[in-house]
Amino acid sequence: MQPATVPDVTFHTRVRNDALGGPNPFEWKDLTSAEVFGGRNVVLFALPGAFTPACSDDHLPGYEQHADDFAALGIDQVICLSVNDAFVMFQWARFKSIEKVFMLPDGNADFTRQMGMLVKRGRQGMGMRSWRYSMHVEDGTIRTMFVEPGFRDDPPGVGLKVSDAGTMLDYLKNR
């Protein structure tokens, strides 16, 4: 059974601060669950890993492509979460030209673990990762989740059948 509200965790992010100057003008900024979800209407999708084929070729680009459609339906922010650190999430977004989806690193897997979505991916040398899912969250309350079938440790892969942008858009249009 999934939690009714999002877990209370701290996400360790990096933000640009031009006052720092130099080639790497970024600094650490911790964001709490309350800051990410509180008083907001959010769509979050979680995936196994940055730069992986289905995540890079379909899952993330689908949400980026439809970010304006989500906004038109009253969504304040579309968030991509992965058990990767802030540096990897930044470079992945840059590599994929992501400008509208907020990249949220869950490097310690605190959020993913408390969501009950943490799985072993040792067979692929990926360590502990998030299962693939999406959810609609209003003011910290989970309204719906679309979890990919076959939840288990060490799957040969994790398909993209129900956590895609199209499924979430259909849900939002028809609720």
Image (cartoon, grey):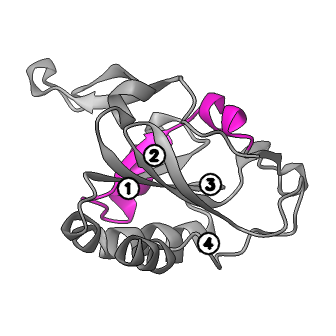
**Residue at disc 1, secondary structure:** helix
Contact, mark 1 vs mark 2 (Cβ under 8 Å): yes
Q: Is residue 133 left or right of residue 56?
A: right
- Which amino acid, mark 4? Pro
Q: Name the mark on residue 53.
A: 4
Mark with earlier residue (2, 3): 3
> Residue visible at 35% across and 20% down?
28
Cα separation, mark 2 vs mark 3, equals 9 Å
Cα separation, mark 4 vs mark 3, equals 9 Å
Residue identified by numbered label 1 = 93
**Residue at disc 4, secondary structure:** helix
Q: Which residues are magenta?
A: 88-116
> Residue visible at 58% across and 33% down?
107
**Residue at disc 3, secondary structure:** loop
Cα separation, mark 4 vs mark 1, equals 14 Å
> Residue visible at 79% across and 69% down?
157
